[in-house]
Image (cartoon, helix red, strand yellow):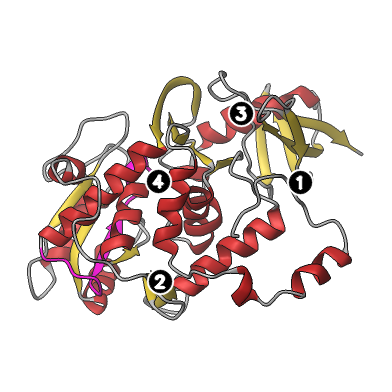
Amino acid sequence: MIIQDAYTPLRCLADIEAIEQTPIEQRITRWDFALNLLNGCRIDPQRAALHATCLGDVDGPLLTWRFADLERRSVQVANFLRSQGVQANDAVAIVSPTVPGLFAAMIGTLLGARPFPINWMLEAEPLRDLMRESKVAAVIALGPTEGFNIWQRVQQAVQGLSRPVPVYTLHDPFGPTHQNDLFSLSGSQPGTLAFDRPVAQRQDVACYVHSGGTTGHPKIVRILHGGMVFRQWAANQGLAFTPHDVVLSDTPLFHIGGLLVRGLVSTADGHTTVIPSMHGARDKRYIANYCFKAVAAASLSTRGRVLVSITIWRPGLAGLADSSVTTPASAFTLGRENNRMSVSSATWVFDVATRPPARLSLCLQARSMS
């Protein structure tokens, strides 16, 4: 079993020793992460898979995809790519900030090919080089969008390739679609896989990611299905996830941490994922709306340390009462100048608290530290 239905945290060394009594091969009997993603969509198809707020505004519009929607769109993407000649071992470059469509693009590509999420902030030259070295068969990218120059750089990168590749677009969830919109093109595809797909094995390549490029151009890294499934299992053991949790996804999916624990692992576990802003944690409005409104309750008048903990509501099941757990607190330095909050450094765990029918009811606690 990959995930426990009830909250079961590791509390002592004896819990670790108990885990070690059973070999990992007996705990994990299937190593196909793409199928785990489909399983996550089927735990509760009517549950919200994705909530997206517009540029960090918790009081603004909210876009929601159910797990049934996410599975259908993901499978349609897989079928569409196969219909366009993309094969199982082909790389598909994905260059986009975190929007709901990115999850379906990633899952669909995992089912039918090898997704290669690329840092959307890269210049055209390293984008081109990564596409060339991975021999991409297609590109999925954010279309022309205010505040992003992704489309212009992707166009330059593709023009520098030795052979033409199709480019499909994603869009701002609160904006219009673009030409070659991936979901408009794939929408007529069946909602079940229309091609034979063998179950992936532990050593099979699932996707590509790339290094940060701090010592030169980014380098391509192969990620195995075994590594992704193990990361899901390990995260569930260490963080005691259950299918009833809600997770805040504010780190990019081209980053391995954002791709897995705050991204696709949440989907494979049946969590609701909240996308606060297309810009993620780089968006100051998101930081202000999701964090500082709660932290402001500490009423700091001078610079000081503030301890913030996040409460996760777990809705009651089968007539049981609701419960809540509080994450380990994280400390960061805040200052107040002219009634405006500022942050100088921060490290925290983002698990959003939500309690239906409220849309995004955050339950953060803050107190001053001497």
Residue 208 in picture, x, y percent from top left: 37, 71
Separation of marks 4 and 3 at Cα, in angstroms? 20 Å
Query: Can residue 123 be seen?
Result: no
The numbered mark, 1 or 2, whose residue comes first in the sequence reads: 2
The numbered mark, 3 or 2, whose residue comes first in the sequence reads: 2
Q: Is 262 rendered above or below residue 88?
A: above
Q: Residue at x 79, y 36 (%)?
A: 303
Q: Is 339 rendered above or below residue 71?
A: above
Q: Amino acid at mark 1?
A: Ser
Asked if the stretch drawn in magenta spans residue 90, the answer is: yes
Tag on residue 330? 1
Separation of marks 1 and 2 at Cα, in angstroms? 29 Å
Q: Secondary structure at mark 3?
A: loop
The numbered mark, 4 or 3, whose residue comes first in the sequence reads: 4
The quadrant where residue 28 appears: bottom right
Query: Can residue 283 be seen?
Result: yes
Q: Amino acid at mark 4?
A: Thr
Magenta part of the protein: which range?
85-101
Q: Secondary structure at mark 1?
A: strand
Q: Nearer the viewer, residue 197 or 89?
A: 197
198 relative to 224 in the view: left or right:
left
Q: Residue at x 62, y 36 (%)?
A: 352
Tag on residue 98? 4
Q: Secondary structure at mark 4?
A: loop
* Quadrant in which the C terminus is drawn: top right
Instruction: Give the mark toward the camera: 3 or 2.
Output: 3
User: How many neighbours does mark 2 have within 10 angstroms: few (below 14), some (14-19), or many (20 or more)?
Assistant: many
